[in-house]
Amino acid sequence: MSALKKALTGKNIGAGLMYFYVHFAMEVLCYFCLKRQAGPASFLWLFPLAYDVLAFVPQALAGYINDRFPRFNAALYGTLAMCAAAGCFALGVFSNRFVPLVILCAGNALTHVGGAEVTLRSSGGRLASPAIFVAGGAFGVISGTMLAKTSLPYGAVILFMLTALPFIIRAEKYKSPEKSAAVLCRGFYYANEKISPSVVILLSCVTVALRSYMGFCLPLAWKTTALHAVLLYVAMGVGKAAGGIFADAFGVKKTAIFSAAASLPFILLGNRIMPVSLIGILLFSMTMSVSLALIVSVLRNAPGLSFGYTTIALTAGVLPIFFFNISSYAVNSVILSAFTALCLAAMAVIIRKDVKRVD
């Protein structure tokens, strides 16, 4: 219990909590806008695809730039861009809806990078803060999706997004832009030093991509109502936060290997048993922060770029879903089992042995 308490009160955990809210509000706004769009089937297929690519792939470039210019408050300008895009959707400013979509995606990318920069630079090498920041997105996605089905006006969601501005401004004080990222991120030492940094980055990204694709292979015969969808995303969000907290408390390697291996039987056996499935999904989501920590461990001078690598990998894992979808429980079970084995092998190789932290 003392280890968990220490993890929950780690260095600058407040930055992660602030950006949990920012990330939550951001995804509420983005998914509210996306789900409000209507049109022919071809449009409804292309619009989300364009969003995934345009919002996530550019985060590597945005992160690289913010690494070079750490005083730039990316999240502040990203939030304003997203609010402007939502206003354009609401008022029909552009006849082509892809124009405000590009603005929305640019704002999303900047705000994501802003959160990554603040939480990684201020965490002292611990994972809880960036993991809590990332977890906010799952709660925002389902909330925005649900709100889009109501008669709530765009203006209300824009005002809600604007409530994140004080947190964004306050959280910048945690970033210490006057210090180099390499110094601030020196606590990230989770990669196996015997493995080439390029191999660490490659295998970390492959693991993220595989896990991203696996998320769409989860057998969820029990998911039939809106409440079930909410519980699914809650389990994902809690799992993402818990992964960072447990990694700080008990070790990155133990947490990553245990959660990945333990999730598989719960996921496969929980196809029609919701509580069992939710436990598996929570465990499944716990490895998300580990891959980011591994990349930062070999790119300590570039936390923003490191975060961008993971978002590119996430997009790579999502893209196949837009072109084909496998509904067979048996086939998906084989895919989940094989990909889990690959991820376990990769993590066993590239994560260094857990050592007791002295800070």
Image (cartoon, helix red, strand yellow):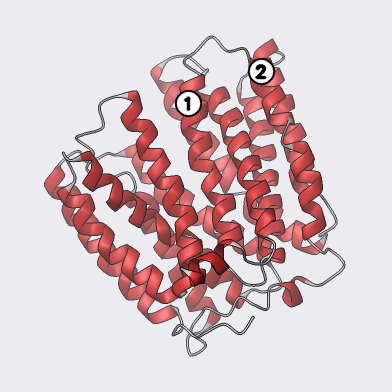
Residue 44: image tag: none
Q: Give the secondary structure at mark 1.
A: helix
Which-is-in-front pick, marks 2 and 1?
2
Q: In the figure, is residue 235 to the left or right of 29?
A: left
Instruction: Name the kind of residue labelled 2 in the image.
Output: Ala
Q: Which of the two residues, 170 or 150, is positioned nearer the viewer here?
A: 170
- 231 over 215 or under it: above or below: above
Q: Quadrant of residue 81?
A: top right
Instruction: Name the kind of residue labelled 1 in the image.
Output: Thr
Badge 1: residue crowd in 10 Å (few <14, some 14–19, many ≥20): many
Q: Which of the two residues, 45 or 180, is positioned nearer the viewer here?
A: 180
Number of numbered discs visible in the structure rendering: 2
- The answer to whether any part of residue 39 appears in the image is yes
Residue designated by label 1: 145
Q: Which of the two residues, 48 or 129, is positioned nearer the viewer here?
A: 129
- 353 over 235 or under it: above or below: below
Q: In the figure, is residue 160 to the left or right of 77?
A: left
Q: In the figure, is residue 279 to the left or right of 272?
A: right
Residue 141: % across, % down? 50, 34
Q: Give the secondary structure at mark 2.
A: helix
Q: Residue at x 55, y 24 (%)?
A: 32
Q: Quadrant of residue 350?
A: bottom left
- The answer to whether any part of residue 47 appears in the image is no
Q: Residue at x 52, y 27 (%)?
A: 144
